[in-house]
Image: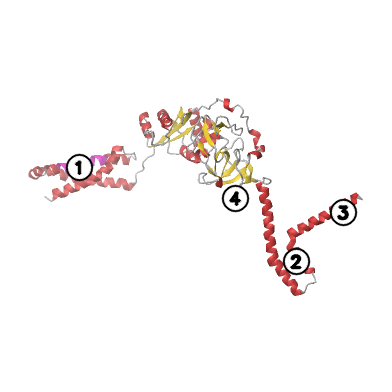
Amino acid sequence: MFVMRFIFVIKRIIIKIGEIISILFFFPIVQIFSNAKSKNSFLRKILNYLFIIFIVTPFWIFLEFSILAGILVFLLYFGVVKIPIPTSGSSMLPTISVGSTVYLRPFFNFPVLKTIVKRGDLITFQNNNTEGKPYIKRVVGVPGDKIVIKNGYVYVNDKMQKEPFTLKPKSTFGGRQVAECKALEVPNNNVLVLGDNRKASKDSREIGFVSINDIHFILPFSEQVKLEGDWRDPSNDDNNVNISSLNVQRYVALLNKKREENNLKPLRNDPLLNNSAQLRAKVMLEYDDFSLDGDISKYSMKKALADSGYSNIIYGEYPITGYYDENELIDYVFEFSESRKFLLNKDYQDIGVSTFVGELNGCPTQIVVQHLAGYMPPNYSKEEIANWEKVLENLKNIKASWEKIKDSKQFYEKNKQDADRINEIINTRILNITGIMEKMKKNEWLSKSQIDYTYKDNELYKEQQELAKKLNGI
């Protein structure tokens, strides 16, 4: 008896569920069939059909969409359903392997539906500093946190962070936006993010704080269990004294391999450039001045090259703070489009690399400075060469006639100063322009004195014309 009653109750429940489903998903159709079977008059049925089609159905569609959207938002907000996000690059090793896909929640940033960002969360974001593509990084600091990077570790509110997700211990160093040993407070509505592979990540150290408004997806730290497989034990991080050391020769070999892969000629490691890089490295740390022209230190790369006895046409430098071995440094510099473009410049032929350990903001810091230089022919235009040739030819044509002025002794004695001066100008111009023409025809760069003369020649031409007008008018 009990079993029969139980079966009856179950049947009733199933019927009720079916009725609810039919109402939710087929309500307009059910109403149309009900209207067709009704005993209403033909006109009344027509009016009912119109009411169902134009009033009930649109409202039902809106209601259905709202219910389904609400269910979907609920599932996404609470992480029941996640979105697959493809990744690239090595900046999030060991948590995210190169080219793998991670499943993240959409980030909600509405007044009534707001996702709370916490330290350790993974986020994707995109802004003007991400080169037109989304980045995936880990949140290290939230609004109000005081962040300091020193001795290879991150300190949050004066406490060293135990970070099992970093690829290596003692691997976090400052950058242009988050300097070594310099405390920063995360502003309101912003977060500070870092990649787990700290030596190969473009993150807040280079692009600054990330606005919460720029976040697209998130994976809370509590939901990263499946990503912990390659994490390490950080319990002894504060006792770790190992630091990477850079082998310059091996680094240059790795760099030349990259250049070869891009059909570029290898760079020659020049001892003079090694020395200029060393000179600049010392000054950079001493004055906390990483500008190429030495805005604060007044010691530019150009001055360092001259002091090292090196000279070339084009040159540039790339400094970076931190302790790197050759493989780590290659990974780091090729993570950024700016440094990648710099190191793969076809116009460079020589390279110098130097490391220097000093203090920055009161903390021991290593800096790695790379100096690249090369020769690039000037490639003067045919028109430019032709113009100078024409000037030189005209000067040679008038030279003899102005020298004959001395044959008219009475006229010459009376106008000796002007006559000597115009001949001096003509000879000076011929001498200098001849030297300029020789360099141009060989496609060689003009010397500094020759470049300076090209500006002075116009002044001499004007003076020559005035003297000629004066002497011819006498």
| Amino acid at dot 4 | Pro
Looking at the rendered image, the disc whose residue lies closer to the viewer, 4 or 1, is 4
Cα–Cα gap, marks 4 and 1: 80 Å
Q: Which residues are the magenta region?
A: 419-434
Q: Closer to the camera: disc 2 or disc 3?
A: 3
**Circle 2: is it few (<14), some (14-19), or many (20+) Cα within 10 Å?**
some
Task: Point out residue 29 in the picture as x, y percentages from the top left corner.
Answer: 75, 63
Q: Which residue is mark 3?
A: 8
Magenta stretch: includes residue 249: no
Instruction: Check disc 3 and report its element: helix, strand or loop.
Output: helix
Residue linked to disc 2: 32
The relative height of residue 189 versus residue 62 in the rendered view (above or below) is above
Residue to which mark 1 is pinned: 425
Q: CA distance from mark 2 to mark 1?
A: 106 Å
Q: Are marks 2 and 4 in contact (CB under 8 Å)?
A: no
Classify mark 4: helix, strand or loop.
loop
- The residue carrying pointer 3 sits among few (fewer than 14), some (14 to 19) or many (20 or more) residues within 10 Å by Cα, namely few
Whichever of callouts 2 and 1 sits on the residue coming sooner in the sequence is 2
**Numbered disc in front, either 4 or 3:** 4
Where is residue 232, by image quadrant? top right
- Residue furthest to the right: 1
Instruction: Give the mark toward the camera: 3 or 1.
Output: 3
| Residue 430 is a magenta residue | yes
Count the labels in the image: 4
Q: Residues within 10 Å of mark 1 (few under 14, many from 20)?
A: some
**How far, Cα to Cα, is label 2 from label 4?**
41 Å
Quickly name the residue at label 4.
111
Which of disc 3 and disc 4 is earlier in sequence? 3
Q: Which one is nearer the viewer's eye here, 80 or 334?
A: 80
Horizontally, residue 337 falls left or right of residue 70, namely left
